[in-house]
Image: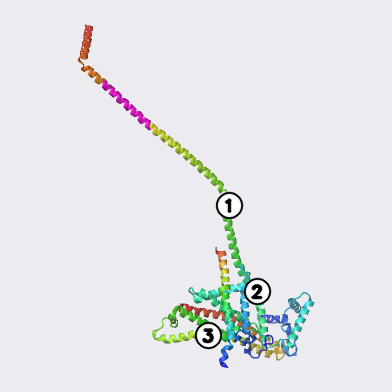
Amino acid sequence: MLNLINTFINSPLDQFESQTFFSIFTPFMDMNNFNITTFALYTFIVLFIIISLFMFTNNNNMIMGSKWFITQEMIYDTMVNTIKNQMGGKLWGFYMPFIYTFFMFILVSNLLSMIPYSFALTAQFVFIISLSFMVWLGMTIMGFYKHGLVFFALFVPQGTPLVLVPLLVLIEMMSYIMRSLSLGLRLAANVMAGHLLMIILGGLLMQFMSINILTTILGFIPLLIILCVVMLEFAIAMIQSYVWTVLMASYMKDVQYLH
Amino acid sequence: MNFCSLTLKSATKPLLTQGVRYVPISTNVRYLSSPSTPPPVKDPKTKAMSIIDALPGNSVLSKTGILGTSAAAAIYAISNELYIVNDESILLLTFAGFTALMAKFVAPLYKDFANARMNKVSNILNESRTRHVDAIKERIGSVSELQNVAETTKVLFDVSKETLELEAKNFELKQKVDLAAEAKSVLDSWVRHEASLRQEQQKQLTQSLLAKVESELSNPKFQEKVLQQSIADVEKLFSKLK
Amino acid sequence: MPQLLPFYFLNTLTYGFILIMILLVLFSQYFLPMILRLYVSRLFISKL
């Protein structure tokens, strides 16, 4: 059922549930993977926003873009500096588009989810954690492909006494494996916590304001606090994408150069 | 407190301008029916006029029409449960406030920054373009100084041709002089040869003469004749002496 | 049926990974080279 207009939120967690708008049904095979759900709709929106950020702002490929293109240039400069500083060496340029893709995706979907009544793509734990797991798995495969069994040298920090090596290898391996989980969990948990906080505060204020006229007027003071929370969430939305980028670049450096 | 009042104003401004659908709502949603809650700081009339000016349309009639239609639409939407006022409405309010804050404070800053950066980049580019144009003009000037280079070359060619001709003449004359000198030396040597030849002939002549004389002398007849001659001479001399 | 639980998320994963792949191709093929070309042409104009 098209539940786009009549959105009545009962639980704070309802906003993270994706509904099916349009389901594809064939008698021969299971096509439910390609149902148009809220998630799919928002992937289209993100794609459209990213494409239009680049295509409609570059002033017909002139040497000076429009005012909006300055943002793209700034993001590009920031990404180049960050990835260069994190990875170093010569290989950072090869993996920059990869990391840049994740940065833009997370940034755009985080900011998109800040609009009221919209859906948070990055709060989907399954998707985000599988994304981070895929990234981790690809990096590990690349490390083994590049270094062979020498890759295990990553688990022994330089200058370790020989006695401590087994213990340290165990700990380092645990932390290395946990990276796959923590990278995505950090992002999804932050975004989800932010949205939950906002919706719960909004609900509380709603209840307070609906008592009588006096509380309605008084309610504008806590509204300012919620406004501050919203601003904080905007900041978090941007910082989390940056954090993902920095961590991904540093993991990539570990895999490429082994320390 | 100043900041607070500012934010309050800007948080409620979108409510005034666009969210007219909240305004005269029915009984159960009275909590949002207070668009004029912030105390008017300035003259309320000018404020109202500015709000009215912000609406699209030209005359007051069309503006009131828009206001009335949007209010009626809001009432209709809420009463028919097309729009439900719930927790997200608060977030919509705060988001609108955030957007207004952004539009009021951050957007001009960004605009200034973007304009400054665009000006900087385009200034650098224009500067380098003018520099390039100057360099090209300079080169054109330096080249245009050589525009009569063909005539100069022609003159130079003529001069060199003349020089060559003169040199050829010079060489010819030199050859002639050389030839004359050689001829002279040859003639000189011929003359010397002739002279030595004549000397030789004279020498031979005298020798042959001497030999003839000697042979004559050795002839006794002649000797006798000479003797008699000489005796006759001596006698003559003696006769004279006497 | 708890064993069907992973299949509930297949839709999300399908669309998400398709989006990531499309974005990766777009960025590495079109958008980042576009910015790079812009910077390089600015460099060529100003420094040469």
Q: Quadrant of residue B86?
A: bottom right
Does residue A172 lie above or below B178 as drawn?
below
Q: Which residues are magenta?
A: B185-208
Percent position of residue A178, x then y: 50, 86
Dominant SS type (magenta):
helix
Name which of mark 2 and mark 1 comes first in the sequence.
2
Q: Which residue is mark 3?
A: A182
For the N terminus of chain B, give its image quadrant: bottom right
Badge 2 amino acid: Pro
Q: Quadrant of residue C22?
A: bottom right
For the C terminus of chain B, give its image quadrant: top left
Query: Is residue A229 visible in this depiction of the protein?
Result: no
Q: Do marks 3 and 1 share a chain?
A: no
At horizontal 57% and vertical 66% (from top left) the residue drawn is C41
- Residue C25 within the magenta-colored segment of the rendering: no
Percent position of residue A46, x then y: 62, 79
Pick out the residue farthest to the right: B61
At horizontal 39% and vertical 32% (from top left) the residue drawn is B183
Do the numbered discs 2 and 3 sit on residues whose CB atoms are within 8 Å? no
Q: Quadrant of residue A8?
A: bottom right
At horizontal 49% and vertical 78% (from top left) the residue drawn is A253
- Helix, strand, or loop for circle 3? helix
Task: Return the mark for residue B108.
Answer: 2
Q: Which residue is mark 1?
A: B144
